[in-house]
Amino acid sequence: MSLSMLFDKTAVSDMMTAWPTKPVLHTPPDDSRLPGIVNAAFINGYLDTGTAPAEQLILIKDGAALHSRAYTTDGYLDPGKVAKWRGRGYTIQLRNLHRWCPEVHAICAAIQHETGYGTYATGFVTPAGSQGLHHHWDQNMGFVYQLAGRKTWQLWEPGVEEPHREQLASNTAPGSDVLNRMKTMHPDYEFALEPGQILVLPRGWMHNPHARDQVEESIHVTFVARERTGYWIAGKLAQAALTSTPLRRVIPPASVVEPATFAGQIAEARDLLVDWLAGADVSTLAAELLQDARTEPNVDYISHAPRHDPNGQHQTAT
């Protein structure tokens, strides 16, 4: 199980050599096992039985999220309460499916091993005529797999260059300023995603997904690939360099608080770091980093802390 569960051989080959930078629609290969594993019954089963972990769910409508007490009883997911809010138009977001669904974990792990990109999955159930999240962009590639119903996706070309991790997020300045300006513009693309279709949604593309014009509930799962960049490599190299004994030596307080002396300490640390990097065995580091890329476990849904609205609900944006 890997990218070949989502895309045909030609698409997979193209992705491995030239990662997509524009939105495009695909369908899984005819022999793919994906529809038999990830489908509407699979998602509804967790909600109808209350067996999904409550801490991994968010119920959200028009950008405002309910407190977890609204849909739990004694800390556990309450199917009756979930059904009530679902009937009132609240989108249900099921985060980190790969952490608690073995079948989804296997798919994400296979994609991560094949690409070196840490992969996680998030599910969304949006009632007909409703909307959960509003305009935003994400910091990573998303493969949006529509399971049931239809969902409209309005897309805008990136307004910021190469958003990454916390940098240039759409809900914090300066990204939020760009987002507000882009919202006044006509979308560059608009898709009505059909069941069985996969939308390739590159990072940085602002999107406004909704089911406001639909008469059936929409269910989709997004597989998120956290791409590797020079930023990631640099961070790993810096971590490795810090194992150098000279860089771990204590700097006396006087050499910290006296500006000229402190500048000398910074220059010395810089030179030690440069010397370490220049002498590093690149082949050995490549093998170690590849192992990290394929196996790192801390790949989770990224969100910023929710804000409270005047009615006591949480405000959230991703």
Image (cartoon, rainbow, N blue to C red):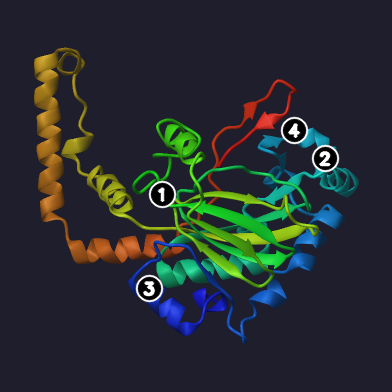
Query: Which residue bears the numbered disc 4?
Result: 67
The reply to whether the C-beta atoms of the residues labelled 1 and 2 are less than 8 Å apart is: no
- Rendered location of residue 227, percent (x, y): 40, 58
Q: How many marks?
A: 4
Q: Which comes sooner in the sequence, label 2 or label 3?
A: 3
37 above or below 317?
Answer: below
Query: Which residue bears the numbered disc 2?
Result: 72
Q: Inspect the image, locate mark 2, and give the three-letter code of the amino acid beneath it.
A: Thr
Left or right: 71 as drawn, with respect to 57:
right
The Cα atoms of the two marked residues, 4 and 1, are separated by 32 Å
3 above or below 264?
Answer: below
Q: Inspect the image, locate mark 1, and give the three-letter code of the amino acid beneath it.
A: Pro
| Tag nearer the camera, 4 or 1 | 1
Residue at the (80%, 45%) spot, across then down: 89
Secondary element type, mark 4: loop
- Using the rendered view, name the quadrant where residue 40 is placed: bottom right
Query: Which residue bears the numbered disc 1?
Result: 158
Left or right: 100 as drawn, with respect to 301:
right
The Cα atoms of the two marked residues, 2 and 3, are separated by 43 Å
Quadrant of the snapshot with the N terminus? bottom right
| Tag nearer the camera, 2 or 3 | 3
Quadrant of the snapshot with the C terminus? top right
Q: Which comes sooner in the sequence, label 1 or label 3?
A: 3
The Cα atoms of the two marked residues, 1 and 3, are separated by 22 Å
Q: Please tell me how crowded label 4 is: few (under 14), some (14-19), or many (20+) other residues with Cα within 10 Å.
A: some
104 above or below 163?
Answer: below
The Cα atoms of the two marked residues, 4 and 2, are separated by 9 Å
